[in-house]
Image: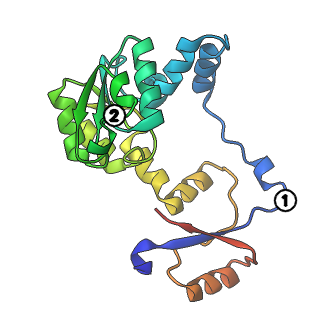
Amino acid sequence: ESSSFGVFFTAAARSGFFHSCSSRPSQRQSSFISAQLSRPTDRTAMRRLVLGTRHLCSSAASPPRKVLIANRGEIALRIARAANELGISSVALVAPADRASLHATAADAVVEIPCYNDASNIIRAAQEHACDAVHPGYGFLSESAAFARQCEQAGVTFIGPSPATLKTLGDKVAARELAQQLAIPVAPASPTPCVDADEVRRAMAAHDISFPVMLKAVG
């Protein structure tokens, strides 16, 4: 189990490390965000950012006409409200236990499904209800590269990162290697996953890493 799970560790951040690391959007994204938020009271601009737009998180050529909300609760409610304010139709997914949930009443239509992690059923629901986009919210399938790829293959826009981005950043070793290629500062770490305590000790000795260390799941 530990072998398939895979763990790598990273040294605890040294003093000032986080001050030297800043996650900044590209110039185009910064310009877009600035334009959207130039008026703090512009709720429509805020809704666009909540829903997601092609400028930041979708490869679609135009805004979606109808979006399937592949989530539940508070985030599903916010997506439904954002879609409504932008004039986009929405379809909510509802598991049996959530029939009376508020998000079920906020969308234009409701589809009952067994669970929120069934990718095939979700895509089928999107197609049957003529949804041209799926918004995964957060959690559940929002970080699944396989789900994003299934949406792409089905001709449904996945509102989120591309499958390639999700796959890379979903693997912490691969994500760390990418950061290094882009000259982004990273904390000292083992270059490959460690599957037991002995491997951790050997990696620490080989790379001159001392305690404290942080253990992280690879994916």
Mark linked to residue 6: none
Task: Identify which residue, 3 or 122, lies in the foreground.
Answer: 122
Q: Is residue 192 visible?
A: no
Q: Residue drawn 73% across and 66% down?
A: 12
Q: Residues within 10 Å of mark 1 (few under 14, many from 20)?
A: few
The amino acid type found where label 2 is placed reads Ala
In the picture as drawn, the residue positioned furthest to the left comes out as: 128
Task: Identify which residue, 189 or 114, lies in the foreground.
Answer: 114
Q: Secondary structure at mark 1?
A: loop
Q: Which residue is mark 2?
A: 100
The amino acid type found where label 1 is placed reads Ser
Residue 91 percent location from the top left of the image = 29, 26
Residue 65 percent location from the top left of the image = 30, 16
Q: Secondary structure at mark 2?
A: loop
Q: Is residue 46 above or below residue 203?
A: above
**Left or right of 71, for residue 182:** right
